[in-house]
Image (cartoon, helix red, strand yellow):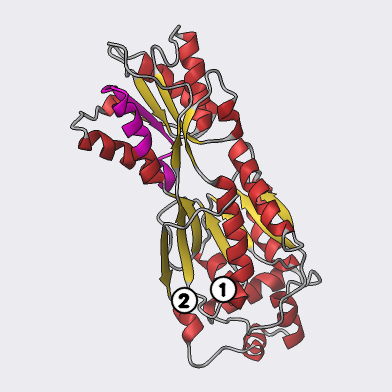
Amino acid sequence: MQQPKPQLTSNTAAPKNAKDKKRTTISEIAEESGLSVATVSKVLNGRPDVSAETRAKVHDLIVARGYRKRSTPEPQTPFIDVVFEEFESPWAVEIVQGAMSAAQDHGLTIALTSLSEGDERRVWFDHITSRGTKGIILLLSQLTNNQRADLYARRLPFVVIDPRGEPDPSINSVGATNWAGGREATKHLIDLGHREIGIITGPADLLSARARLDGYRAAMEVAGLTIKDAFCRWGNFHVEGGYEQAKILLGLPHPPTAIFAGSDLQALGVLQAANEMNLRVPEDLSLVGFDDLPISNWSSPPLTTIHQPIRDMAALAVRILLDFKSRKDQAEQRIELATHLVVRESTAPLLS
């Protein structure tokens, strides 16, 4: 499949500490920490034979002093780390498939870390950075300032896919055109004659959820339609989130005739809620999802949805990591891949 052309790229300079005229040395870190140069070097090179206390002391100093490792030959580590907030959905599986395919093209494998467990959440960063890796791909995650500075210090590249909040201009990120997708989904329903259109989106702290809602609002405003607060529901991107919010929307005295769900999984929940309320899709309710997961073509009816190039996003993240040290311009990249509407059988013209 041909790689979709990136729609937006924005470059920014590397952190200021990378431009300091006087570069902090390993010897200075060793002297200040009271450790040997060999021990500091072990920490920087991810050697396992160093205590957690010593590793933490060196981490704190390299961050505080803005240390950055000098360019060295590419390590022969055979893997890339992919770190999830959770690994429970088909969306995550699509990310893994895309990353694995791209990594295999370069003779690499993928190491997965899920932060759903409390203990794993506390130790994941030290575990990954100490063992050595080609780079890190983060899903819906945020790094602390210290973690980010530590990665820069080690010259260890990382990419965030679908950033949780507004993308930091100093971080490589890959996303999709969520606003455009939300607008296109809503416009499709408007073009079918629907005027009472509800939306179920994801958590308010997710940039993608807010962008899809903003796209919905834009389409409604351009069409001169009223945006009803009661029709705009925040949920999560899982089946139960769509089900719970759909029960509220469809239980209103004057419910919407169409719903734009912020994910395909939410749309499955809407289908379940509609079935329980004896509503037919699309005869009584038109429904659009978002993602175009494989399951969307097997739902009943097959789901009209916004195609998000999930595998391509993951593959692009891998390439950014692998190209990092070979690029002359190592400024960070913010890239969004295009979405598009896929019409199936869950939408139909409004019956008068």
The local crowd at label 1, few if under 14, some if 14 to 19, many if 20 or more residues have their Cα within 10 Å, is: many
Q: Are marks 1 and 2 in contact (CB under 8 Å)?
A: yes
In what quadrant of the picture does the C terminus appear? top left
Residue at the front extreme?
2
In the image: residue 112, left or right of residue 291: right
- Vertical arrangement, residue 18 with respect to residue 187, above or below: below
Q: Which quadrant of the structure image shows residue 328? A: bottom right
Determine which residue is flagged by label 1: 152
In the image: residue 228, left or right of residue 293: left
Task: Tell me where residue 22 appears, x and y as whole percent.
Answer: 51, 93
Determine which residue is flagged by label 2: 15
Task: Point out the stretch of residues depicted in magenta.
Answer: 184-209
Residue at the left extreme?
224
* Alpha carbon separation for disc pair 1 and 2: 8 Å
- Name the kind of residue labelled 1 in the image: Tyr
- Name the kind of residue labelled 2 in the image: Pro
